[in-house]
Structures are given as C-alpha cells and as structure tokens.
Image: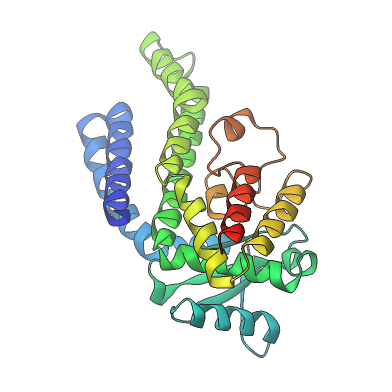
C-alpha cells in the first residue's frame, strides 16, 4: 500500500509541475517541467532522507560518541527484528524525534539533544521504539518523499509570488497571470502541500504508537513521553521546522505556532487520543 501511495504522490508532483510549466511556458514549459519532475522524482527517492537530515543539521553519531543512545537503539532494533539503523542527533533543546530512510536497510533514527535531557530512560525507549515502528512499517520512505514534494510545492509557490509581483503593470494578460500566480501562492499551494502530507494518513501514527508500545514493552512510558514532547512543542518551536517536514516528527514541532492552516489540517492525531489509546493498550496487556 505504501509503495502505491508513493507512486501516486510522485505522479501528482509530476502533474503539478507540468501544469505550472504549461501555465507559464506553454508546450515548451510542459516539456521542461516533465524533465525537471522526473529528475526530482528520482532525487526524492534516493536523496530525500539526506536532504531532511541536512535541513535540521543532524549529525551522525557512533557507539563511541554516544554509547548510551547507541546501545538503546541497538537493543530495541534487535527486539524489533530490524537492521541497526544509523543514529543522528539534532542540537536543539526542544525534545522531538523522527525516523527516515527509504527501507529498513537504510533506516535512520534522529533525536534532539533536548529529548535525551527531558525524558527518562523508559520514556526515551518508547520514543525510539515508535520511530523503529515507522521503519518496520516502511512509513519512512513515503514520509521523506512527501517532505520533498511539499518542499517543492512551497518553492513553486514562491516562484509564483515573485512572478506575480514583477508581472504586474505590463498588460492585462500579464496582470491576469500575476493574479493567478498570487492566488496559487496564497490559496492553492499551501492547501496542496497539506493535502499531500495528509495522504500519509494519521492512522500511521496510531499504528506506530501501538507497535512502539509493544517493542518497548511499556506503552505507558511512551504515553508519558508524548505528553512531555507535546507540552514543549506548544511552547517552543524546533529551529528549522517547516510545515513541509512537520509530519516526520513524533509530535508536530509547529504545534505552538498558531498557524491556522497547520492546526486545521494537522498531520498528527490529537496527543490526548494517542495517550488514551496507549493507556488502553497497557490495560490490555
């Protein structure tokens, strides 16, 4: 199912870029954007994880550099019957975490320095187990590809905005094109980016919570971790966070920004509902 979703999302990106090319360059624009979109599709598949890690200035650590964290990830990966993922750290006091990689063989778990200071050992185990569940379910490919797609849409929106600004006043036809570009920037682009993110489905977070609770053997610790991370996310914004990558994290890092679009089309289920399900899981053990 995830492979089908990835294919459909890449096809949507191709169609969107070709439409934009046709809008601004006619048939030649369509042809150029077809070539560009094919290159972007291949790039998204092979390099989207590297781009996300670079965006957040994540640094890879070894067993010697972070023995406690490395050992924790190794133990949980073994328990989940997964290859050892690479481990990255993001220098930020804001607690959060995400997983990436196009397959379990190329899995990556990234955590902030803040999460290691804020959570207890059991809570951090629950968070790592949640991220390993995403790798096990192969959610990470579609998540990172979607981040790239949403980023490209944002880039196109900025292009349309500048086109609208510098296109005004030339002629009626140009004014209409500028108005169309401005409307695309203000209305269509952010909605399209958000809807593509929602194509991942919020249900994947519930599933990762459940599997993470099983892997860590402590659903209540994961529930407690979610509450703590959610509290910090509502009071401090993780540096470099963008709407196009917010769905990657265990808790939306933009929860406290007050952006109506972010709140209206949230890529994460309500934390209270996730916590309630984990507590129910614990009672049923």
Q: Tell me if residue 252 can be seen.
A: no
Toward the top, the furthest residue is 172
Count of numbered marks: 0
Toward the front, the furthest residue is 284
> Residue 89 location in percent, x, y?
65, 71
User: From what the image shows, is residue 225 above or below residue 171?
Assistant: below
- In the image, what residue occupies the spot 47% across and 34% down? 157
User: From what the image shows, is residue 215 above or below residue 277?
Assistant: below
Q: Nearer the viewer, residue 166 or 110?
A: 110
Res 104 quadrant in image = bottom left
Q: Nearer the viewer, residue 20 or 110?
A: 110
Res 124 quadrant in image = bottom right
Toward the bottom, the furthest residue is 64
- In the image, what residue occupies the spot 32% across and 55% down? 2
- In the image, what residue occupies the spot 32% across and 36% down? 16
Colour treatment of the image: rainbow
Res 19 quadrant in image = top left
> Residue 252 location in percent, x, y?
62, 47
> Residue 266 location in percent, x, y?
56, 38
Q: Quadrant of the C terminus?
A: bottom right
Q: Nearer the viewer, residue 268 or 37?
A: 268
- In the image, what residue occupies the spot 39% across and 66% down? 102
Is residue 134 toward the left or the right of residue 8 in the image? right
> Residue 51 location in percent, x, y?
50, 61
Q: Nearer the viewer, residue 158 or 42?
A: 42
Q: Tell me if residue 32 can be seen.
A: yes
């Amino acid at each position: 199912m995830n492979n089908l979703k990835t294919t459909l999302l890449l096809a949507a990106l191709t169609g969107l870029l070709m439409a934009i090319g046709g809008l601004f360059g006619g048939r030649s624009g369509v042809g150029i954007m077809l070539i560009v979109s094919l290159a972007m599709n291949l790039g998204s598949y092979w390099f989207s994880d590297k781009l996300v890690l670079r965006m957040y200035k994540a640094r890879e650590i070894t067993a010697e550099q972070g023995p406690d964290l490395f050992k924790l990830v190794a133990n949980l990966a073994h328990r989940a019957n997964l290859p050892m993922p690479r481990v990255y750290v993001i220098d930020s006091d804001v607690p959060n975490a995400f997983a990436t990689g196009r397959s379990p063989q190329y899995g990556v778990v990234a955590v902030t320095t803040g999460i290691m200071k804020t959570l207890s050992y059991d809570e951090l185990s629950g968070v790592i187990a949640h991220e390993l569940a995403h790798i096990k379910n192969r959610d990470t490919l579609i998540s990172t590809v979607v981040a790239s797609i949403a980023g490209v849409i944002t880039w196109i929106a900025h292009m349309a905005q500048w086109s609208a600004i510098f296109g005004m006043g030339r002629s009626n036809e140009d004014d209409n094109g500028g108005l169309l570009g401005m409307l695309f920037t203000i209305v269509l682009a952010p909605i399209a980016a958000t809807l593509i993110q929602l194509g991942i489905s919020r249900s994947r977070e519930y599933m990762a919570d459940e599997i993470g609770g099983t892997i860590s053997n402590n659903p209540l610790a994961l529930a407690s971790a979610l509450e703590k991370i959610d509290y910090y996310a509502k009071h401090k914004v993780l540096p470099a966070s963008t709407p196009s990558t917010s769905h990657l994290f265990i808790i939306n890092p933009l929860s406290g920004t007050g952006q109506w679009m972010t709140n209206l089309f949230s890529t994460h289920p309500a934390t209270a509902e996730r916590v309630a399900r984990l507590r129910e899981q614990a009672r049923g053990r």
